[in-house]
């Protein structure tokens, strides 16, 4: 029993010390509070392009078209989660929530242009904030 | 005579390299399938969750009533447990807002709890002696916990220290290697097995991401479809091989 406990303790220590190999740059640095600093999420321009397509369709009143186009954003955002989230998890969640709100509003049983304009506007602003433009 | 009988009546596979390879790959495939159904095809997480849960119940029923180890049935069950375990953690995190610190700790405690009750009831935690319904029930309960725990711990590593999939593959693979070293040095085999088993979940997830994620994010850019197809091909090959061996006369 004691031998097993010692082995467990030794291996737990060994495994914990693999954490020492993770470079400091990987650790989450405190995010700057000011919106003017670009998020560590990095380049979101591909997503922003699709979002602005959706917004344009909403402005035209074409909610059906907007709903179709935002699906592209949903799938591409979802696919890139493993690559983006580690860069800045908290920021990733902010953008993810904004996308979710836009999706909800566009997929509502009775979507309104006004409501969709609001959530799309909010999404675009959020993405711009992450790119350091505000 | 005794060993042969035990081998024939053990409901779960022998712990070979093939076992670990299938385990790691099936984790990734399961996650990709669930994701494709929920997002790409658009059923949403709720419906996908219910469908997977129903499939799991029927697979478990089929698996547990058989009197012997049937590889394709066993591994289908593992994939479904993987999907459902992941979905449970995701539901807690995304819908109920449970912190990943809490879910990681809770599932670790749940797993420990399963082992305590299992040990008390059956006298042994030996995974080469799953020869009764009761033992098998504990076995699958433990496996479900390892998938939920592996998901939570892996997600926690991403969110707490920003560990991406490249580091993930290195860290989780290294942890398994250290586990093997500890086992050779005398670590209790049951502890070594389950520790490695938990780790294969985040390892599988990181490996899948490394292959499928765009080069922009440091992946190999193969895409989810090609990666899944490749993994499925390997799994089917290995399970077919196991199936052939299982039906050979002893």
Image (tube, coloured by chain):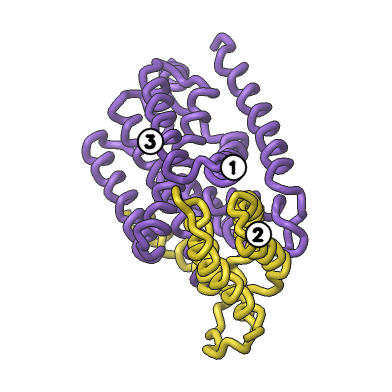
> A114 and A105: which one is in front?
A114
Counting other residues with Cα less than 10 Å from the Cα at mark 2, is it few (<14), some (14-19), or many (20 or more)?
some
Do we see residue B204 in this rendering? yes
Q: Residue furthest front?
A: A61
Counting other residues with Cα less than 10 Å from the Cα at mark 3, is it few (<14), some (14-19), or many (20 or more)?
some
Chain assigned purple: B
Position of B183 relative to B160 (above/below): above
Could you say where residue B187 lies in the image, as x and y percent from the top left? 44, 52
The residue depicted at 40 percent of the width and 59 percent of the height is B93
Element type at marker 1? Answer: helix
The residue depicted at 40 percent of the width and 52 percent of the height is B91
Position of A132 relative to B171 (above/below): below
The residue depicted at 60 percent of the width and 36 percent of the height is B22
Q: Residue furthest top?
A: B249
Q: Is residue B140 left or right of residue B174?
A: left
Residue B140: which disc?
Answer: 3
Task: Please give the chain letter of the residue carrying mark 3.
Answer: B
Residue that mark 1 sits on: B36
What colour has chain A? yellow
Could you say where residue A67 lies in the image, as x and y percent from the top left? 59, 52
Q: CA distance from mark 1 to mark 2?
A: 26 Å
């Amino acid at each position: 029993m004691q031998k097993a406990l010692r082995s467990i303790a030794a291996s737990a220590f060994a495994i914990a010390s693999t954490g020492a190999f993770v470079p400091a740059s990987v650790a989450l640095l405190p995010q700057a509070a000011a919106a003017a600093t670009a998020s560590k999420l990095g380049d979101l321009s591909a997503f922003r392009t699709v979002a602005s397509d959706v917004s344009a369709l909403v402005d035209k009143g074409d909610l059906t078209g907007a709903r179709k186009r935002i699906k592209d954003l949903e799938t591409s955002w979802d696919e890139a989660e493993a690559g983006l989230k580690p860069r800045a998890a908290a920021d990733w969640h902010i953008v993810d929530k904004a996308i979710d709100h836009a999706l909800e509003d566009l997929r509502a049983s009775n979507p309104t242009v006004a409501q969709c304009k609001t959530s799309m506007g909010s999404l675009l602003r959020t993405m711009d904030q992450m790119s350091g433009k505000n | 005579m005794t060993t042969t009988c035990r081998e024939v009546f053990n409901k779960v596979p022998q712990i070979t390299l093939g076992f670990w390879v299938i385990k790691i790959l099936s984790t990734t495939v399961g996650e990709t399938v669930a994701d494709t159904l929920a997002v790409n095809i658009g059923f949403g997480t709720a419906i996908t969750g219910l469908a997977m849960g129903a499939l799991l119940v029927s697979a478990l029923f089929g698996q547990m009533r058989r009197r012997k180890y049937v590889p394709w049935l066993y591994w289908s069950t593992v994939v479904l447990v993987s999907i459902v375990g992941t979905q449970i953690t995701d539901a807690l995190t995304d819908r109920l807002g449970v912190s990943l610190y809490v879910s990681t700790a809770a599932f670790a405690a749940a797993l420990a709890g399963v082992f305590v009750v299992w040990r008390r009831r059956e006298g042994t935690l030996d995974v080469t002696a799953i020869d009764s319904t009761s033992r098998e029930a504990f076995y699958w309960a433990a496996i479900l916990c390892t998938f939920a725990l592996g998901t939570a711990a892996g997600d926690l590593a991403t969110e707490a220290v920003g560990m991406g999939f490249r580091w993930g593959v290195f860290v989780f693979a290294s942890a398994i290697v250290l586990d093997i070293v500890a086992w050779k040095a005398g670590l209790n085999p049951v502890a070594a097995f389950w520790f490695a088993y938990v780790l294969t979940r985040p390892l599988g997830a990181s490996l899948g991401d490394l292959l499928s994620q765009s080069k922009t994010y440091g992946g190999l850019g193969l895409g989810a479809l090609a990666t899944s197809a490749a993994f499925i091909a390997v799994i089917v090959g290995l399970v077919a091989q196991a199936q052939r061996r299982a039906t050979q006369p002893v």
